[in-house]
Image (cartoon, coloured by chain):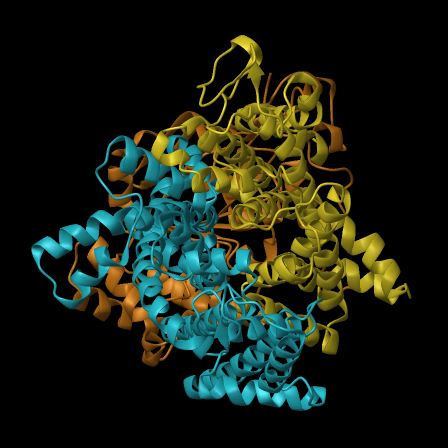
Amino acid sequence: MSERKIILGLLKKNTRFWVCLSLVLVIVILALIGPLVTPYKPNQPVVRDGKYLRSLPPTIEHMHLFGVDNLGYDVFAASVYGLRVSLSVGAIAAIVATVVGVILGLTAGYIGGWADLVIDGATNVLLAMPPVFIMIMVGTFYIVGLGMPGRELQNILFLGCLIGLLSWHWTARAVRSQVAALKVSDFIAISRLSGNHPIKIIVKDVLPNIASYILLVFVIQLANALSTAVTLEFLGIKAAEWSLFARVQQWLQMGALITGVWWALFLPGVVIVMLIASLYIIVLALEEVFNPRLRRV
Amino acid sequence: MSLKRYLIKRGITYIVVFVVAITIVWALVRFAPGDPGLTAVMRSFMAPGVRYTEEQIEEFKQRARAMLGLDLPLHEQYILFWARLLQGDLGWSMYYSAPVAPKLVEVLTYDLILITPAVIVSWFLGNWIGALAARHRKLDRVFIPIIYVLTSIPYFLLGLAFAYILGVVYPVFKPTIMRTDIDPFLSSPSIETFSMFMKAYTLPFLSMVLVSLGGWASGMRTLMIYELESNYARFMESLGFSERKVAGYAFRYAINPQITGLGIQIGTIIVAGIVVSSVFNYPGAGIALIYAINFRDIFLIQGITIFYTLMVIVANFIIDILYAVIDPRIRLGVVGA
Amino acid sequence: MSSVLKLEKYKVYYKTFVDTVKAVDGVDLDIRRGEILGIIGESGCGKSTLVQSLVLPKPPMFIAGGSAKLLDSIELTKLSSKERRKILLTKIALIPQYVLDAIPVIKKINVFLRDLAKDKKMKYEDVLNTFIDRLKLVNLPQKVLDMYPLELSGGMRQRVVIALSTLFKPDLLIADEPTSALDVVTQRYVLELLRDLVTQKLVGSIVFITHDISSIRQIGDRIATMYAGKIVDVGKLEEVISSPLHPYTAMLIKSVPKLENSYRVSRLVGLAGAPPSLVNPPPGCRFHPRCPFAMDICRREEPPLTNMDRDRYVSCWLYSKR
């Protein structure tokens, strides 16, 4: 039985994996086509029959799936538009963190020596100083016009890169230990004896062996980045005006809690939690598949 | 390597890390566009609501420049910064209209009261639950979704949920906390002040504990499952050891990375504490941070960053000490888990 | 009672999610009191599975049929986990292949011993004293007790495991490839140690698993050949080696290099081919694809284990009558 067949076969049987994968896909699709589905815009108050609507709980009629908040905005629209921003920032952050982390981890693990020391030092600094603080400082003082309309794309890119560049240390450590373990294995020794250039060895021998590991790492980074992005939004560091959780913060300030407009506060949160939890469970399922020792027979 | 030498080595590493980290913070403040440092200090001289002439503004600028040492060459500014820091001067906060350092020390006490028990409880409980899930297959099915959902909830969101459900809808606890809820208990503990304290303290505490718990539990579960399949576990089973005994040994192996993990996670948990306290208006650094961000209060943000970096490093060092004491492998110089 | 363990039609399979591997497929074997029985065979023939299943059958391994009677009274295939724990180490003990990390490294050996005593509901002092006696036997100093397994060499750890396994004088001791990772000198030492264990009645009988005939040759009383999940040849050591009846046994013996011969005198004869799949074993005799004497009937029917007098059993159509 080939290795690949076993992996695919095990995956097929893992119901948790498919449930969570579908959830993730649904949410992503929602973010992509959502604005086409809902007739409302997140920054236009809902008017019907000439009257401004407020504080409407979720109903199916008029497509207020998540209800209307206490300021008159449709929550579903806010969620869908906001999700796009959060997801984009999270995705960019995850890609940046993974790429940087993998490159640095490979360098530290394979080349070792002073490169390893420097990277290890950088990792230690990042671990000591909660990167969130740097994100806050940069987000507050370095970004001009954060949250202003018109510069969304740049801001999303910037924020994503910022988060990513401050989150690579975990990946780098993990990759480094994998590479360091591989380095002393026999097939790498043979490759070196054959006179292969280190870069070639890294690309053709080491990388394929840690590929599945990198995949896992990427998904975890994605989940973490989403969580960070959302928390930053809540603290006021947002990429776009309609960033979802910045909205939530506003609603909080406006007393949504006291007036009981729970659908505005929590329904977007439920979506995000389901997304992040699904990502984690996908990683769990993949771990079980790749590592026989974790399989529960 | 003896215990002492190991710890001294770690200590030196931490000092270096601290210096580098604080330098980065300083650089971020110094080179921020629009020089918010200047603006902040200037504004602290100016009374609100009063209009100033051009010359007066210039004068304030000069004073601010002098205070920050902006006329000095860069490296002297850096030294000035460290001199002030070591004397405990963290600048002036616009939002509080008071020096940053004393204010933060006040605030720190409240944060420690919230964070320390939360960390300890969530770590112990989380590891125990994770180990349980690993040992009992039937429990595991139920636990996995619970554990993973818990760890996925952003801290502030759980805080919000609790504040709403248990603070507004069923007003068992207080959704908004004031210092007057906490202080009486600290100064004169009694049954009444304790219940008042718990009314305020429980929700933010629970928010922190539950999310962190999920993280520890999921990690421990994976580690335990891995250990229970190892050679020594099989050997012990073949000797006739009870499943409980074997699990006990596996737990001892599995807990090591969790201890290291605690050091790594401290930073995240501290931030979580800040965020949660902002939701509840808990008198910690949380709300201060939010206002600092909104008001662009640079020295406050810088101060919070420095303080908390220090906290993280100290916590890590304590964990290193504990770890070296517990694990014979470190003492014997055998590296790698 | 002269039979310590009696296996009848014993089957042990592995259930993978794809298919079922028939690792041990109908074994009849008899282990007598006071003997050292060697089981030889290629890697993957099922010998490790056989002994593992006697001690600790864990999923995906499961006992698919047959019976394994220990001491004529304990049916190993039908034990509850509580009953099983009672007989482990006291009546049946296993020296595993993976001695290097068998003993948990995080506790000192005397602490581990204390846990063992507590688990077996015995007094620590008694267990400790017995262990100290065993340490003398395996030539280890007493200070080993106060050390972590990390501080011991591989050979020392193996001797600790041997000492542990004989603590309670088990009726059956199983040694799974005890000499595979050792140099020749240590090999000899371990083999003689095993012999002494039986002579001094510290264990009842020993089952010795190996793929190296020359080691079993030194201490074995009887020898059994295992191929593709079945026992094909059993008998007294010298008889089997001097006149190997089963073609597979013959080839195994011929594969052993002889010290005094150089290649000019006689070439090493290897075994052509590879062991069959244990998921779908070939019909008839499992060895027929590689057997130089394969006949028509070998391809169709499996030969039974035939008694050839003088305590000799073979499973081969060359010797069994139709």
Residue B218 placement: quadrant: top left
Locate residue B250 relative to residue A278 in the image: left or right: left
Between A134 and B152, the residue placed more toward the observer is: A134
Residue B43 location in percent, x, y?
55, 70
Please give the count of numbered marks on the rendered protein.
Answer: 0
| Rendering coords of residue C111 (x, y %) | 28, 68
Left or right side of C178 for C148: left
Residue A258, position as x, y percentages in the image: 34, 35
The quadrant of the picture occupied by the C terminus of chain C is top right
Residue occupying the far left of the picture: B191
The answer to whether residue B292 is visible is yes
Using the image, determine if residue C68 lies above or below residue C181.
Answer: above
Instruction: Establish if A35 lies above or below B143.
Output: above
Q: Colour of chain B?
A: cyan
Observer-nearest residue: B27 or C13? B27
Q: Colour of chain A?
A: yellow
Q: In the rendered image, what is the letter of the chain coloured orange?
A: C
Q: Is residue C172 visible?
A: no
- Placement of B47 over or under B77, stated as above or below: above
Q: Quadrant of the N terminus of chain C?
A: top left
Q: Position of residue B271 (x, y in %)?
A: 47, 58
Query: Residue at image x 21%, y 47%?
Result: B199
The one nearer the camera, A1 or A228, is A228
Q: Is residue C164 left or right of residue B97?
A: left
Residue plotted at (53% across, 27% down): A16
- In which image quadrant can residue A115 be found? bottom right
Up-down relation of residue C114 to residue A205 (above or below): below
Give the residue displayed 34% in from the left and 54% down from the top. Answer: B282
Front residue of B122/C79: it is B122
